[in-house]
Structure formats: C-alpha cells, structure tokens
Image (cartoon, grey):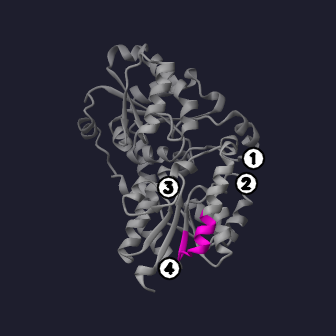
Amino acid sequence: MNDSTITFAIVVGEHSGDTLGAGLMQQLKQHYPTAKFVGIGGPKMLALGFESLFDMEELSVMGVFEVLGRLFRLLHIRKSLSEYFIANKPDVFIGIDAPDFNITLEAKLKAQAIKTVHYVSPSVWAWREKRVFKIAKATNMVLSLLPFEKAFYDKHQIPCTFVGHSLADDIPLVSDKLQARKALGLPETAKILALMPGSRGGELSRLVEPFLQTAKKLLTSEQAKISELVFVVPMISDKRAEQFHQLQQKFAPELPLSIIVGKTQQVMAASDCLLTASGTVTLEAALIKRPMVICYKFNPLTYHMFKGFVNLKWFSLPNLLANKSLVPELLQGDVTVENILPLVEERMFSDQSALNQAYTDIHLMLKQNASEQAAKAVINLL
C-alpha cells in the first residue's frame, strides 16, 4: 500500500473529539507521513493539516429537542459526507464520539465495503443497550476509553480495543497549583473557585444562572470574611466566552470574575474547587486532582422523555470509574443554589487530600498511551 494514496476519513462532533482526533492523526502520520485526512475536524486537527468539509460546531448539539431544531441541516451534512466518501473511498472511516450522527454514517459506509472504526463507545452499558447490535453492524472495530466498556463488548462478541484515555497520557500525575497560578497571573494565596458551566451552548445557558448565584452567595459566607475569594471562568472558545459574558450581564453583572479562554486545564490546576457541568471535563478534573461539584440540566422535555430509560447510580465519569461516590452530583431540579453552596464550601475550605489516591488510581488505570494504541488498532485493521 502506497503511503501517499492512504486516506483516513474522520468525523468529530465537539472539542473533546478534536483532541482525540489530533492525537490519533499525529500517531498515524508517523506511519503514513503523506496520508490524507478528511471529514469534519476541529481546530487542533486543522492545525495538523486536516481537510474539514463542514464546521465541527454544526454537530455540537445535545438533546432531542435541540437536535430537532437542526435536524434538516444535520441530515444534509450526513448525506453529503456519505456521498463524498462513497465517491472518494477512504481506506478507513473513523467516527469519533457523536454516536447518533456517526454510527448511521458508519453503517452506510461499511455497506460499501469501507472499513469503519468507532472511537469512544456510546454509553450502551448505561441505557438503550440494544444499540450495541446496531454498532456491531456499523463498525469493524470499537475503540473504548474505559476498561469496563471492553468487558461489555466482549460479552456481546463485538471487536473492541481498550486504548485508555489520551487525557491521562497528557496530564501529569501531579499538577502544580502554584505554578498554574503564576502562569495565569492569579493570586497565590486566594481561594479560587472555577465556574465551568459547559462547552455547549445549551448546557451553558441552563447552568450559568445557578453557578453565578452560588458564587454571589459564597461572597457573603462566613468563610469569605477570612479568605480572599477569586472566581475564574475557563471557556473553550471566544464564542462561548461571549455567551457567558452576556448571561453574566443578565444575572450577576456586579460579580467580580475573570474569563479565560483556551486554558481550561491550567485554570483547573490553579483552582481549589471546580463547580462544573458533567462531561469529559470532569475526567480532566479528576486527572488534575481537584475537588469538584458536578451539575447537569437537560432540556426539560428531553429529561422527562428519557429519565426512565437510564439505569445508573452515577452520571459522572469519576464516580463511574471509581465505582463509588467520589464527588457530589446534582441533576436537573436538584441544581439549586441551596444544594450547591454547602457542597462547594465543604470542598473549598476543608482538607480534600483523601481524594488524591482515588484520583491517582483512575489516572494510572487510563494511562495507556491512548493515541498510540488507537493508531495501532487502526493500522491492524488496515
């Protein structure tokens, strides 16, 4: 096989997928320096020479009713990609996360004798378990980030490779708080709370108000009288930073805070506690080893439609990986200032060092040279 003729088709739907895609590209380029990479990618992938046929942000949508509002556009994009890849057959198609979009696309391409890989297993072990049969028909290989996912696929005799998580490879076992504060110009002795209401527009809009109101309450607490409090808001992009700023002007224009774009991990390392949306960012927080309070609010109609189908004790990755309640979770109607405030205060102002061993165990479990392992699995499939 001539390296210059090899084409890797990749589709990612959000920033966490862009990070995985960029790591995979770097490893594949070591084996195939002149290969072509095409599909939908984010800024990290674009910086490596990826050819993106559509803007990644178009796929960054979550929830039934949010999807319905963009359904025709999403269907058009998927149809266009399908036609493009069938006409210009890649050597392998790799769908990274975005399962509702990618798995259907993978099935169409596999039916045309194109090898397909799905990178990041959907949560079939948590709800809609029968999706596993659709995945089996759509893919030649699943690349799982979490060890218990491989056990699930093995049970169903579906090819799956546990590759670990690239975040565990990239984040050091010890994240220096003082060094991070100096790099960001934050006060070295203050108590710092990071407000992290999400990277998607919908989730951010639902969590900003309770997060800001919690911060306002915290300023009036007894602890605030003896500690300098600083609030920082890491944002994934200028677009999300502007959305947050507009919502802050509506709900808490007087609240002093710093919005920092593109340095999420550094902000987390500098913080004493994180008030965060659920998602991949909670795994980052566990790997950086900071206490956190996790909240999530779905579109109300989405939540009521699907809450009966989910069979999980916990919804956050740190708790799922530890198989116990390491960090507090608040969902939907429980996301209130009255519930959030005491949880944040406890983690801001009392010793949380006992968490570190559990976090370290998670870190070592997932530290497997993920991008290298994922690239090996793709090359073996080729």
Q: Quadrant of residue 189?
A: top left
Where residue 153 sits: x, y (%)?
64, 66
Q: Which mark is residue 380?
A: 4
Q: Given the image, on which type of amino acid does mark 3 rest?
A: Gly
Could you say whether the residue bearing mark 4 is in a helix, strand or loop? helix
Q: CA distance from mark 3 to mark 2?
A: 22 Å
Under mark 1, the amino acid is Phe
The amino acid sitting under disc 4 is Asn
Is 345 left, or right, of 304 in this rendering? left
Residue 338 lies left or right of residue 272; in this view the side is: right
User: Which picture quadrant has residue 44?
Assistant: bottom left
Upstream in sequence: badge 4 or badge 2: 2
Q: Amino acid at mark 2?
A: Arg
Magenta-tinted stretch: 81-93
Residue carrying label 3 = 17
Q: Position of residue 113 (x, y in %)?
A: 64, 79
Question: Along the horizontal axis of the image, is 232 left or right of 365?
Answer: left
